[in-house]
């Protein structure tokens, strides 16, 4: 949810979230890596300006989340999940599901995606930079991925690049005033590959670990 006027941000607390991960380790997603040097430099400058307001450490690479998959189950776990009395959660994601998604995406022979990077904005819990998908390329890919796979995420998809999560409660007026004083830039970027990867659920704002890429020039590995 976007941060509303005359409201407070929702802070990220520095503790484990067992009610969410339930002992599981790796949370998987499809995402777009941000590798354009000028854009990365700009994002780093913005992150530095807002560092006092953001949860630390804040080392996750800049990226655009495309589709949230869930907690990645190892092959052995997947086999065990078919046995009686084994707990299966609705945000588990199997190797078989990944392979199905991967083959569906490759079959599309996708072309490079054109995106525009817009203004700084804020959710209740995070500061971000807007991503404008004028050709609905991301929406179309998400539609394909969601046809047979449940997405354990927010109902409304808003493509963005997260700058960081808030470390405590801040008045919205304070943040929007700070944003208004920053010279903002816009970028037109071309995306040449999609990435499937994961992060460690118990490491807040930890690294993304890429596992597989799909090149968009020819739609092949």
Image (cartoon, rainbow, N blue to C red):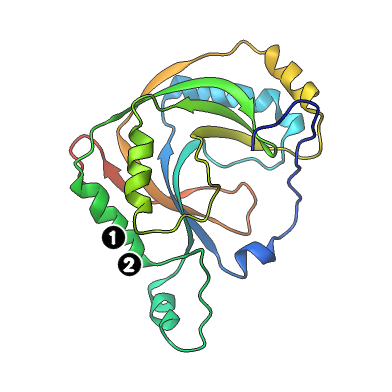
**Disc sitting over residue 54 in the figure:** none
Using the rendered image of the protein, determine whether residue 221 is visible from the camera's viewpoint: no
Q: Label 2's element? A: helix
Q: Residue furthest bottom?
A: 84
- Above or below: residue 199 compared with residue 123: below
**Disc sitting over residue 96 in the figure:** 2
Residue at point 59% right, 49% down? 206
Tell me the quarter of the picture where residue 165 sits.
Answer: top right
In the rendered view, does 7 fall on the left or right side of 187? right
Residue at point 53% right, 79% down? 87
Using the rendered image of the protein, determine whether residue 89 is visible from the camera's viewpoint: yes
Residue 146 versus residue 219: which sits nearer the camera? 146
Q: Pointer 2: residues within 10 angstroms few (<14), some, or many (20+)? A: few
The reply to whether dot 1 and dot 2 touch (C-beta < 8 Å) is yes
Residue receiving disc 1: 100
Q: x, y (%) of residue 120?
A: 60, 22
Tell me the quarter of the picture where residue 119 sits.
Answer: top right
In the rendered view, does 181 fall on the left or right side of 157? right
In the rendered view, does 107 fall on the left or right side of 18? left
């Amino acid at each position: 949810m976007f941060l509303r006027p005359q409201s407070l941000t929702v802070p990220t607390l520095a503790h484990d979230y067992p009610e969410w991960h339930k002992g599981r380790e790796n949370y998987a997603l499809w995402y777009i890596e941000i590798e354009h040097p000028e854009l990365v430099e700009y994002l780093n400058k913005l992150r530095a300006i807002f560092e006092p307001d953001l949860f630390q450490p804040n080392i996750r690479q800049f990226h655009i989340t495309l589709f949230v998959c869930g907690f990645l189950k190892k092959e052995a776990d997947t086999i065990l999940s078919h046995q009686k009395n084994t707990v299966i959660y609705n945000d588990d994601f199997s190797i078989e599901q990944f392979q199905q998604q991967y083959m569906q995406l490759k079959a599309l022979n996708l072309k490079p995606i054109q995106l525009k990077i817009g203004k700084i904005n804020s959710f209740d819990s995070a500061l971000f930079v807007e991503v404008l998908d004028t050709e609905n390329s991301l929406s179309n890919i998400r539609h394909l991925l969601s046809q047979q796979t449940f997405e354990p995420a927010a109902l409304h998809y808003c493509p963005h690049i997260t700058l960081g999560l808030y470390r405590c409660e801040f008045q919205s007026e304070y943040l929007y005033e700070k944003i208004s004083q920053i010279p903002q830039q816009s970028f037109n970027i071309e995306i040449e590959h999609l990435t499937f990867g994961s992060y460690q659920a118990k490491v807040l704002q930890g690294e993304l670990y890429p596992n597989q890429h799909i090149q968009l020039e020819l739609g092949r590995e």
